[in-house]
Image (cartoon, rainbow, N blue to C red):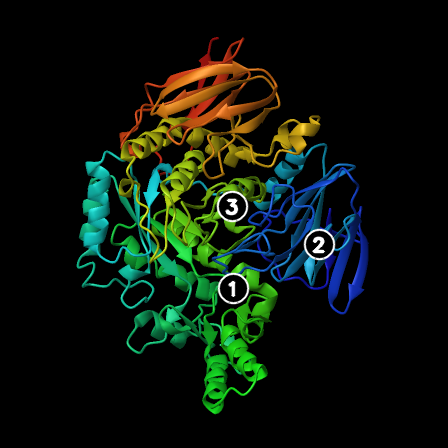
Amino acid sequence: MKYRFGHPYVTGAVVKEIAAAEGVPAHFTLSRKGESVTLSYPLAKEDAVYGLGEQLRGINKRGWHYENWNLDDPVHHEGRTGLYGAHNFFIVCGKECFGVFLDCGGRVSLDIGYTDADLFTVTAQDFDLYLFEGDSPLAIVKQFRALIGRSYIPPKWAFGYAQSRWGYKSEADIREVYEHYEKEGLPLDMLFLDIDYMERFKDFTVDKTRFPDLKAFTSEMKGKNIHLVPIIDAAVKVEKGYSVYEEGVKKGYFCKDEKGKPFVVGVWPGNSLLPDMLNPEARKWFGSQYKVLLDMGIEGFWNDMNEPVLFYSEERLKNALALAASTTEITCLDDYERVSHTFFGLQNNDGDYRAFYHETENGRIVHEAVHNLYGYNMTRAAAEYFEQYTPKKRYLLFSRSSYIGMHRYGGIWTGDNSAWWSHLLLNLQQLPGLNMCGFLYTGADLGGFGGSTTEELLLRWLALGVFVPLMRNHSNLGSRPQECYRFTKTNVFRNILGIRYSLLPYLYSEYVRCAFENDMLFKPLSFVYPGDARAKTVEDQLLVGDSLMIAPVYTQNAAGRYVYLPERMKLIRMKAGDRFTEHVLEKGEYYIPVSTEEVVFFLRFGKVLPLAKPAKNTAALDEKNLTWVKFIEAPTQFTLCRDSGTSEIKKGDFETVLLEP
C-alpha cells in the first residue's frame, strides 16, 4: 500500500508505480504540526525494529532516536543520530510484522522508544509512505527489494583485496605499495588514489608532476592484475581556465542561490561550486566528465564528499571574518563563545543547505528538501554514463553518501570511521540493515580510517572483512600506516588474505544470487530462526549467504568469544588458505577460542561450502578445482556463478553442482 503526504519530490527510489490510497496507513496514528507529519505506533514489549541501512547502534534499532540527514561525521560514536546515508526503510517485528518505506529526500526523524519507551514516532515533510505486510521480516525485505529494483553487481575483481590510504601522493608511492605486497606474497587486486592524484584537488584532472602518464601507469598496473581506483569529489573548483568549471557555469549546471547566482562553497579545492545533480541535463553532463579517466583505462571510482560537504559558504565565511576583525578584545566568555561558535558553525551549516537551489524536472526546489538525494544522483550520473561509454561492461563504483535507489547504480562504503573496536562491531551490525535497503556491495574501512590502528585490531577486522564484498584497508593522512606489510606478523596477514580468495567462489556466487533473488547476503539470526527467542537477542553474529554463520571477535586482547548456535553446525577453523579443520557442535552456547592467526566460522546443517586455493589476485583464482566442505546427509545442490566477471551476467553463467554426502 502507498500513502501520500503533502507534495513529495519523486526520488526515483522505486521502479514500480503504485497508486496512492486514501487515509492513514494501518498500524499508525497521525498528527500534524505545521508542515510536518508525525506517524505514531505503540511498541509492544516483544517488538524489535530492524533496518535503517547505514545507521548507528545495534541490529535492533529500538531504544534510540535517529535522524536521516546525510552528514559527514568522521568521529561518530553511539551518541550520534545519523551518518552519511539516509535509508528510510524499517521493519517492526514482534506482536505484528510489517515494513515501512518513507520515500522522502529531506530530513526524517525517527524516535524508536527513546522519548517514550513504548512508542515509535516518525516525523517528516512531503513524503510517500509504502506499507508492507508479510509473514516474516525476510518476506517483507523481498517485497521491498522487488519494488526498488535489482542491486548493483560490480566486476569480480572488485571482490579482491584493496589497499588505500589518503597519503599516496605519487606514482612512486603507489608502485612502492604494490612492490611491497608483491615481495611479501600478499594478495592484492586494487590500489586506490585519494585526492592527491588531482591537480590542486580539481575533479577530472591529473597532477602531471606526480603522475606524469596516468594512462601508461594504469596499463602497467593492469598488466600486473592491479586496478587503480581514483576518487571523485562532488565540488568543482572555481578557477578561470579550468574547463569543467567554465563549461558548467556557461551551461548553468551548478546549484544557485535565491538570486540565481552560482552558490559558492568551500571544499578541498577552496572556493567551489556544486554540480546540480538533480538537474537531468547537468547530471548527464557531470557523468560525461568521467570519460577523461575512462579513456586512461580506469575501470573503477569512489565518489566522496557528496552529502554534500560544505566546509563553508562564501557568504557565511565573509560574515565570520568580519566578526573576527571587529572583535579586537575578548572581555567575557560571551565574546569568546560568539566568535568561536561562528567559526565552528561554518561547516555543514543548516542555513546554507536552505540557501541554494536545484533546477529539477518539477521546477526549482530548495536543497534542504532533497538533501539526501545528492550523493545518490552523483553516483547515478556516473553509472548512466558508463552504460553509454561501454554498454554491458561492469565498472566498480561506490559512494559515501547515498539514498535508497542508488543501490541500483553502485555500492557504498560506510564513511570515515575510526580505529576503534566499537567501529569493528558497528561494521558488523550495519551489514543487515544495508542489505535490507538493497546495498549488497558495501564495506567499512578495515582497521579504521581515523586514528592509529593496532596489529591486533587490523587482524580482527580482516577476519570480518574476508566475508564482506568490499574488502578495503583505508586510512587517514597522519595516522599510523596500516598496509599489511607494516606489521611483524606478515605471514599471518598473508594467510588471512589468502582465506578471502579461498572463500571467493562462495561469496561471489551468493552475492549474485542475492542480487537476482532480492535476498540478503547478511541476515540477523532472528530472520532465519524466528521461533528462537535467544536468536532474537543476538547482536554480534550474522548469517552470510545460505551456508555460513560468522561470529567475529571484536574486543581487545580477547582469546576467543561466546557464540550461540541456533541449530547443529560445523565449526570451521582456517589458518591458511584452504587448509581447515572442522568440528560438529550441537545447538547451544559455546565459548570458542579464536586466535588472531585464524578465521573461525560455522557451516549450517544441510549446506555446503566451495573453497578455492589461495591466489595472488582474482585473475589467478582457480575456480575449476574446488574443495567442497560439506555438512549434509542427503544429496545437496549449490549454484556457482562462473561468468566472465566483467560483462553482463546471463543465465548460462550459472552452474549447479550436485554434492553427495
Asked whether 382 or 500 is in front, the reply is: 500
Q: What element does badge 1 sit on? A: loop
Q: What element does badge 2 sit on? A: strand
The residue depicted at 44 percent of the width and 71 percent of the height is 253
**Badge number at residue 204:** none
Instruction: Provide the residue designation for mark 3.
Output: 422
Residue 272 falls left or right of residue 514 = left
Q: Position of residue 298 (x, y in %)?
A: 29, 50
Cα distance in 3D space between marks 2 and 1? 30 Å
> For the residue carrying disc 2, how many other residues have a C-alpha within 10 Å: few (<14), some (14-19), or many (20+)?
many
Q: Earlier in the sequence, mark 2 or mark 1?
A: 2
Instruction: Provide the residue designation for mark 2.
Output: 111
Q: Amino acid at mark 1?
A: Leu
Q: Amino acid at mark 3?
A: Ser
Cα distance in 3D space between marks 3 and 1? 36 Å
The residue depicted at 35 percent of the width and 22 percent of the height is 578
Cα distance in 3D space between marks 3 and 2? 23 Å
Q: Is residue 241 above or below residue 47?
A: below
Which dot, 2 or 1, sits closer to the camera? 2
Q: Earlier in the sequence, mark 3 or mark 1?
A: 1
Q: Earlier in the sequence, mark 3 or mark 2?
A: 2
Q: Position of residue 357 (x, y in %)?
A: 54, 73
Q: Amino acid at mark 2?
A: Asp
Q: Position of residue 471 (x, y in %)?
A: 39, 40
Which dot, 3 or 2, sits closer to the camera? 3
Residue 155 falls left or right of residue 86 = left
**Badge number at residue 278:** 1
Q: What element does badge 3 sit on? A: helix
Asked whether 358 or 331 is in front, the reply is: 331
> For the residue carrying disc 1, how many other residues have a C-alpha within 10 Å: few (<14), some (14-19), or many (20+)?
many
Which dot, 3 or 1, sits closer to the camera? 3
Q: Position of residue 608 (x, y in %)?
A: 48, 18
